[in-house]
Image (cartoon, rainbow, N blue to C red):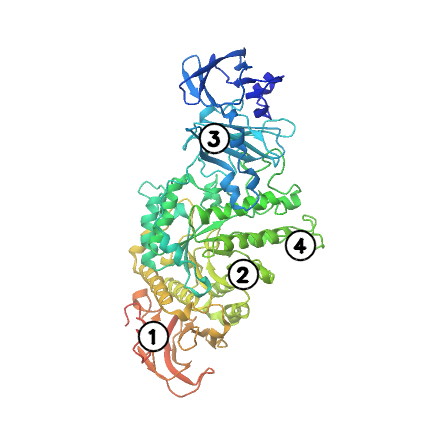
Amino acid sequence: MLIDELNGARLAKPFETLGLQPLEGGGFLMRAWLPGAEAVEVLSLDGNKKICSLERVHEDGLFEKRLPDAKEPFHYKFSVTYKDSVNEVVDPYQFRDEAYYGLSTMNETPANVYKTMGAHLIEVDIDGVKVKGTKFVVYAPSATCVSVIGDFNFWDGRRHPMARSMMGNWVLFVPGLGAGLRYKYEIKDPQGNRLPHKADPVGFYHEQYPSFASVISDQTTYQWHDDGWREAQLCDKLKKPISIYEIHFGSWKRDAQGKSLSYRQMADELTSYVKQMGYTHVELMPVMEHPFTGSWGYQPTGLFAPTSRYGTIDDFKYFVDTMHQNGIGVILDWVPAHFPTDAFGLARFDGTCVYEYEDPRRGWHPDWNSLIYDFGRDTVRRFLIASALIWLDYYHVDGLRVDAVASMLYWDYSRKPGEWIPNVDGGNINYEAVSFLKWFNEEVYRNYPGAMTIAEESTAFTGVSRPTYTGGLGFGFKWNMGWMHDSLEYMQTDPFFRKYHHGEMSFSMIYAYNENFILSISHDEVTHGKRSLLYKMPGDEWQQAANLRSYLGFQYAHPGKKLNFMGTEFGQTSEWNVDSQLDWWLLKYEKHQGIQRLVRDLNDLYLNDPCLWENDYDPKSFMWLDVNDAEHSIFAMMRMDKDRDDEIIAVSNFTPVPYIAYRLGVPKPGSYKVVLNTDDRSYWGSGYGTGSDTFEASTISWQNQYHSIVIDLPPLATVFVKRIKDDGQKQPKQPGSSK
């Protein structure tokens, strides 16, 4: 019976039951379902005319009226009398066309997913009467019934049943609903069982525990001021300096009460700090909505929404806008590799595997106890790509770093034999994920050519950062996990034994030009018992700091863009803890002030010398001058600009023993100057010195160069040397106290 369907929230075709229904022989039947109502009057849409009163045909709130003289459908609203109030409501079941509008174009581009699905504020003009409300669209193809529930209907699934489209989307336009109201979906599975209330998969904003409710939001209110910045980003990022400061938003700095700073507070504090330190970009560990802070954001449930922990949608836009106005790019970590099993989230969304692989040998991630997206399903692929594009579109971010790419590419990632299913060719490559990643990159660069995509990919998979038309995955950059692993292994070795591990520091140049690498020292290296970067270093207190400084100097000299996790820049001593801020108190001490000053000066040197970034990915612009001196643990490299008429040389001594009168090959005659020395006293170094501030090149050929200079190498130090030009060009300043 109809009343049972209504009371059980099992009405699957509300537009065929409620509102105006045509009668055989002419006229209409008006039917309204208003639980708890005692009387209902029908008014004209503008409220100026009473049309009729409905008769209560069931005490639970079913009202009807035959209108045999009505020739055409008309628009109206109800005046509803309850026990203690009278409310005027516009019946949603007269807006069938408005509810279904736009669905046919959803699959034209992935961007149409977030422009169509979710909760959208719209305005309908009916003969001059403007009706404002919210249109809801949710994909639940196997559901038998879906209702939108929220603050506006007592979270009662009986009151607003939605209608199903042919594509499996459930739709409804509810007049009178504005921004700020909470909502979820009540879904019945294929057997008619009610599921836990679900948050909106394409929701733009969500509450925190305990409700995890979605919130109707307005994406049009913020006024941007970054047009100049965005226009300037239409450039070749491979030939630009990129020095990235990776942070976790909630634990960078906290207020006096120990509370994380808001988006707007961070807009001021973080922007000022990053600008002072000379970084070009910040990279945020995931700020997409996630229920568990301890996941660091890598278990997201709201891929279209900035987390409400730190403020509103407009607050987050203000943060990005402020960064841009200060010349700083914003990169976000994005997680399409897996998602958590929270009951309110995507897991078995309509009682079936809408988003995940059904077979746990493909759909379950053993490392993170999470579910894996079904990359072979077109609706899932569009959903994920849409979730990437919205950050570039609505939130103006500059790039996306894709987490855990290796886990997506291989069926046997972290799985033992028998725990995975081979592909159609019997191999371990997930062709569906490969296809998805290619499509993702193509969509990003087609729509946002000024953006960048970065892969966290830890294997030797071929062509990660090569164009899709050449067979690559299409990423702009790839984290150099091999360099990170090898160089840290080397640096953690006692200097006495480093000569036996010399190749670990140079091996990265064997494959440095296979991909567009970013040299990353990320959050993963300073947590879970791995120690802080400073305390990874061997030796006493001074040697640890010196090792760290020399290592950072080597990183900035090495080809590839740069990334360092927060705290590295001042020698954080404790492991990173998501539940507290960085150890800013350490900056009371000269050692940590010195490390911070060095990083600032490294960024300054890096940004102002194109030799260090202009040709990162051209092997002709790099040369080892000394890569075989394992006995002394010395490395010397030369970086050149695109025209090969300018260069900078970096020499690293990774022993605590100074090297006197080290002969260094240089390409041209003239004077050379030390422009940065990580052992400078201003960096809390020994101040041992290099023998002179300037050096005249002799005609003695050395290290495959026609000229050479003789320089003293300080202990545990990286020294940058630059030729002094005689053409009147501005010379690089020497950072630090030794000028």
Near-viewer residue (300 or 629): 300
Q: Are marks 1 and 4 in contact (CB under 8 Å)?
A: no
Disc 2 is placed on an element classified as loop
Q: Name the residue carrying label 3.
A: 183
Front position among marks 3 and 4: 3
Q: Name the residue carrying label 2.
A: 465
Q: Find residue 677 and report its horizontal and vertical position in percent.
A: 35, 70
Disc 1 is placed on an element classified as strand
Looking at the image, residue 696 sits to the left or right of residue 285; the answer is: left
Q: Are marks 1 and 2 in contact (CB under 8 Å)?
A: no
Front position among marks 1 and 4: 4
Q: Name the residue carrying label 1.
A: 674
Q: Name the residue carrying label 4.
A: 428
Q: CA distance from mark 4 to mark 2?
A: 21 Å
Task: Say what amino acid the circle numbered 3 marks.
Answer: Tyr
Front position among marks 4 and 2: 2
Residue 58 visible somewhere in the drawing:
no
